[in-house]
Image (cartoon, helix red, strand yellow):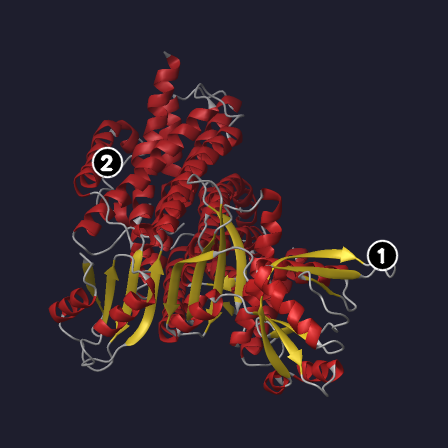
């Protein structure tokens, strides 16, 4: 048995299973990607205050917490110009309140006063952030630039590392395919989080962008291990003049690295689940994003990027 | 063989020693001068971000002005009495409207943001005060040294001459003594007032206070009707330059605007640390069980290597030192998961070689050699992404994460390739006397090989 997950399918599994059925898996990947794109284009993203600018307050009510509606009314009265106030429960005793940007000390104090609902409720101010909108725009630009540069760097590195690979697939194609797989790995969490932010569970914040970059780094690692094996097997093939088909070599490489792929992802998943359940509120959504990314990463390595190598080889031959 | 055993033993002892260092340094014993540096989000406090308006400043002056802004703000923060404040200048604004100069102020433990904002953003207080008759500059210096500022204040009489009346200040060198002096030029109102004061008080001392701190006490030698003043008195050129700068630009050399303010309560921070420790422990235990179950003896080795990795990471945080944030802690915990990967690659490769009938020792050596390119390429690409993250990160959250994660990736390269390898080689049985049960111990957890 190669991995616990696959035990049910073991009877169907031969080393060439994935490669032979690549069209089915491309179809599945396509549907997943399409769903993500649909979610993103329909729901878009709800950005956190870090990006849009505004005020976040975490108010902890030790004794009794006011009703959400009462609190909202109190805030809207205190800040007449404000159109939107978002109040989210966090635990049993805490609210996270978000409003648009406040001007000066007067409005800040008015908000603080409103949180006591005319002095009826006492709260502990665990966090009071007021973030300027210009700063947020810059963060978004930088994040996009970072994603772009990381992809470029990965293509270059892979192209360089695979430059002495035998066979008809040129080394830069390995890099491009790795990045195509990475786009998939990023698309899936983006789609899920677009939906989650739509139903109000989470928002797109800085930690989410960080998570995307980690997924990028981690999933490259995942893909490269399989590609490394392909490279090694190609070298062996040409040394021993075995003349196996490229398709066969890719299938064998995938099969040989399967145990590692699954076990590695399992350990990372174990750690992420620990962070999700025990790491507290701050890193909960961060670990969820990574969880989705890492799982789609191992999926795309096995069922998308590696089979894509075979397609690339067929095109190169023509 | 014995070389491997010695190296492995040394590494284990080293790990135990580092662990001991961590333990005692947290209990106030040996090494306690290396505490964990907690970021503001874990410690609680106030974080302020200002935008500096440098649009009217020439490019060549910009850096020195920002430096002077930093110094000024730091002086004010110090008066505020905060322990370990952080004041730093940052250039930002990639892609948007050109470069933007920013000032970051972090005040650990400060909860009253409004007071802090007032304190930092206040208008400059440059004052000219007349020393009372009978008092001497040496006594002033004595009191200033002793920090008795209240008594010091009582020795002076206000004159009404303040920084708002100075038009500009320059540094010059006295032609005979070659000593640096600061030249002041008052505006019309200041000129009249200054002439009046100097006329009436020849021979007395006129002290210059900046932000409540005494800057110099020049003596009035003659009446000065033209609004030009010269301050001399044993300056180094550096000091004179700074004084001229402070006088010309007031206390804040460039106008600043508060962009972002953030207060984090200390309870929230404590909770985050507590949660991170809990998540780290659970994650570690779960991974350890998995490794033990799946890889048997090599699994034990991996657990030891992982422990070594963890204590080394924590020691690095203390010694470098790395400022730990919530995201940084998550990065560290996540890197434990990644550190296992290198071990798994090696073990899986070794298992393949064992399956082909090689001896345990040979399988280990070949397994390592074959796994190495994958480990190297995987780690380097991850490092690449982390490096870009750190470089472009912008915010402390991302930088903190990238830093701990990056150190983790580098360190895991070391522990997997050195520690795991040495330990495994040192317990691998002799090829000729290899037993079946030994192969079983090195084999996979579920299958018999």
> In percent of the image, x 38 and y 68: which residue is there?
B263
Q: x and y percent of residue B444 in the render?
A: 40, 52
Between label 2 and label 1, give the one nearer the viewer: 1
Quadrant location of the C terminus of chain A?
A: top left
| Residue at the disc numbered 1 | B175
Instruction: Tell me which chain the residue with mark 1 is part of.
Output: B
Question: Can the viewer see residue A200?
Answer: yes
From the viewer's side, name the closer residue of B49 and B120.
Answer: B120
> In percent of the image, x 39 and y 74: which residue is there?
B112
Few, some or many C-alpha atoms within 10 Å of disc 1 (few <14, some 14-19, many ≥20)? few
From the viewer's side, name the closer residue of A317 and B221.
Answer: B221
Q: x and y percent of residue A265 in the render?
A: 36, 49
Q: Could you say whether the residue bearing mark 1 is in a helix, strand or loop?
A: loop
Few, some or many C-alpha atoms within 10 Å of disc 2 (few <14, some 14-19, many ≥20)? some
Question: Can the viewer see residue A264?
Answer: no
Name the residue furthest right. Answer: B176
Q: In this view, does B356 lie above or below B323?
A: above
Q: What mark, if any, has residue B262 been given in the picture?
A: none
Mark 2–mark 1 Cα distance, whole angstroms, equals 78 Å
| Residue at the disc numbered 2 | A33
Q: x and y percent of residue A233 in the render?
A: 46, 30
Q: Could you say whether the residue bearing mark 2 is in a helix, strand or loop?
A: helix
């Amino acid at each position: 048995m190669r991995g616990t997950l696959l035990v049910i399918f073991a009877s169907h599994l031969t080393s060439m299973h994935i490669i032979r059925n690549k069209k089915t898996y491309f179809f599945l990947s396509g549907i997943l990607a399409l769903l993500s794109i649909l979610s993103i284009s329909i729901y878009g993203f709800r950005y956190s205050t870090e990006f849009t600018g505004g005020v976040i307050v975490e108010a902890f009510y030790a004794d009794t917490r006011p009703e959400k509606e009462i609190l909202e009314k109190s805030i809207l009265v205190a800040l007449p110009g404000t159109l939107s106030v978002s109040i989210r429960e966090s635990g049993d005793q805490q609210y996270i309140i978000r409003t648009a940007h406040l001007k000066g000390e007067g409005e800040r104090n008015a908000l603080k006063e409103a949180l006591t609902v005319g002095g009826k409720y006492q709260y502990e101010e665990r966090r009071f952030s007021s973030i300027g909108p210009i700063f947020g725009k810059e963060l978004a630009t930088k994040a996009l630039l970072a994603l772009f540069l990381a992809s470029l760097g990965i293509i270059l590195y892979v192209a360089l590392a695979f430059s002495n690979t035998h066979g008809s697939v040129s080394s830069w194609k390995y890099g491009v395919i790795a990045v195509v797989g990475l786009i998939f790995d990023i698309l899936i969490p983006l789609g899920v989080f677009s939906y989650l932010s739509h139903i109000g569970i989470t928002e797109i914040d800085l930690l989410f962008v960080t998570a995307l970059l980690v997924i990028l780094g981690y999933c490259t690692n995942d893909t490269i291990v399989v590609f490394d094996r392909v490279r090694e097997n190609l070298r062996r093939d040409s040394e021993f003049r075995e003349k196996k088909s490229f398709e066969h070599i890719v299938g064998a490489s995938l099969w040989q690295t399967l145990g590692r792929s699954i076990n590695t992802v399992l350990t990372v998943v174990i750690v992420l689940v620990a962070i999700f359940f025990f790491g507290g509120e701050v890193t909960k959504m961060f670990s969820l994003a990574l969880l989705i990314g890492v799982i789609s990463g191992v999926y795309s390595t096995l069922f998308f990027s590696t089979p894509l190598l075979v397609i690339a080889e067929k095109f190169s031959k023509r | 063989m014995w070389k491997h055993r010695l190296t492995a033993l040394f590494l284990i002892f080293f790990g135990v020693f580092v662990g001991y260092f961590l333990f005692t340094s947290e209990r106030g014993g040996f090494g306690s001068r290396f505490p964990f540096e907690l970021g503001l989000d874990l410690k609680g406090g106030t974080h302020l971000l200002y935008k500096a308006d440098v649009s009217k400043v020439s490019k060549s002056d910009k850096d020195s002005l920002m430096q002077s802004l930093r110094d000024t703000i730091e002086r004010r923060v110090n008066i505020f009495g905060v322990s370990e404040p952080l004041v730093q200048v940052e250039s930002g604004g990639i892609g948007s409207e050109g470069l933007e100069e920013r000032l970051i102020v972090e005040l650990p433990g400060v909860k009253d943001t409004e007071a802090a904002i007032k304190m930092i953003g206040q208008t400059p207080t440059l004052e000219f005060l007349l020393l009372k008759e009978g008092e001497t500059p040496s006594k002033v210096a004595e009191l200033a040294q002793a920090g008795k500022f209240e008594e010091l204040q009582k020795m002076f009489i206000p004159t009404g001459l303040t920084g708002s009346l100075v038009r500009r200040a320059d540094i010059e060198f006295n032609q005979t003594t070659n000593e640096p002096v600061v030249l002041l030029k008052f505006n019309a109102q200041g000129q009249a007032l200054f002439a009046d004061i100097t006329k009436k008080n020849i021979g007395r001392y006129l002290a210059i206070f900046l932000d409540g701190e005494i800057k110099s006490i020049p003596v009035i030698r003659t009446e000065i009707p033209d609004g030009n003043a010269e301050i001399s008195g044993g300056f180094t050129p550096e000091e004179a330059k700074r004084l001229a700068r402070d006088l010309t630009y007031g206390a804040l050399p460039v106008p600043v605007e508060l962009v972002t303010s953030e207060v984090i309560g200390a309870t929230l921070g404590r909770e985050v640390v507590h949660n991170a420790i809990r998540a780290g422990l659970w994650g570690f235990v779960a991974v350890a069980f998995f490794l033990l179950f799946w890889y048997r003896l090599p699994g034990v080795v991996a657990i030891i290597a992982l422990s070594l990795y963890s204590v080394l990471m924590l020691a690095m945080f203390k010694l470098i030192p790395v400022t730990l944030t919530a995201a940084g802690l998550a990065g560290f915990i996540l890197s434990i998961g990644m550190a296992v990967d290198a071990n798994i690659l090696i073990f899986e490769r070794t298992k393949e070689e064992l399956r082909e009938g090689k001896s345990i020792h040979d399988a280990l050596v070949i397994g390592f050699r074959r796994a190495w390119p994958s480990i190297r390429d995987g780690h380097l690409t991850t490092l690449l992404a982390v490096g870009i993250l750190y470089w472009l990160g912008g915010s402390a959250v991302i930088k903190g994460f990238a830093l701990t994660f990056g150190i983790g990736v580098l360190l895991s390269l070391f522990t997997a390739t050195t520690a795991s390898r040495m330990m495994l080689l040192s317990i691998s049985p002799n090829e000729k006397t290899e037993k079946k049960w030994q192969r079983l111990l090195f084999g996979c957890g579920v299958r018999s090989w």
